[in-house]
Amino acid sequence: MTTATGSTVVRQAEIRRVRPDDAARMRALRLEMLADSPLAFLETLADAAARPHTEFAARVAYTSAGSSNAQFIADPGGRLVGHAGGTVAPNEPRLTVIYAVYVTPTWRGSGLLGELIDEVAAWSRACGRPELLLEVVVGNDRAYRAYQRLGFIDTGVRVPHPTIPALNELQMRRQT
């Protein structure tokens, strides 16, 4: 980002695993995610907004520790600007499925996506899972190209979108 005088402003965000005290900011980010990219996630903005804060808090607490499910955030101080989750694949114990990847629009192109994915990959490796899988809505070329740049390879597998039958998702994999 550049200031009006032409000098460069360096933006930094801490990439880390969520903590229970992040619940309110995670809820705000989740609502932003759903408003910005409604096809990319498995619930609607209305459904998420209707859920009580206690449900968000419980989810954040659950994913703040352990080896089966984790959420990572980009925290510049104040409002959260990015998220990526990872969970163990039930039928492939050496695989982590990446889910709910999001970077707020003003931070896109900053390298934040790669940092979030790297954090999920490090956690996955530490848990003994050397491979990552994610799904992208067919036609979301920007996301597809971004994941290719991060080393993900299109497997050729196409699966129905879990909530919108008219759409398909493609699977991409990479080693951690």
Image (spheres, grey):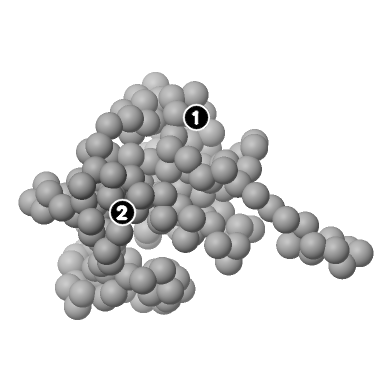
Residue that protrudes farthest toward the left in the picture: 91
68 or 175: which is nearer to us? Answer: 175
Compare marks 1 and 2 and give the one earlier in the sequence. Answer: 1
Kindly indicate whether the residue at mark 2 contacts the one at mark 1 (C-beta within 8 angstroms). Answer: no
Identify the residue at horizontal 50%, vertical 29% (top origin).
22
Image location of residue 60, percent across then percent down: 38, 30
Query: Is 96 on the left or on the right of 114, as rendered?
Result: left
Identify the residue at horizontal 54%, vertical 57% (top origin).
112
Is 35 situated above or below 160? above
Q: Secondary structure at mark 2?
A: strand
Image quarter where the N terminus lies is: bottom right
Mark carried by residue 103: none
Mark yes or no: residue 49 visible: no
> Whole-Å distance between the Cαs marked 1 and 2?
20 Å
Image location of residue 175, percent across then percent down: 27, 64
Q: Secondary structure at mark 1?
A: helix
Is 92 situated above or below 158? above
Image location of residue 98, percent across then percent down: 31, 53
Query: Is 146 on the left or on the right of 62, as rendered?
Result: right
Image location of residue 85, percent across then percent down: 35, 46
| Residue at mark 1 | 22
| Residue at mark 2 | 98
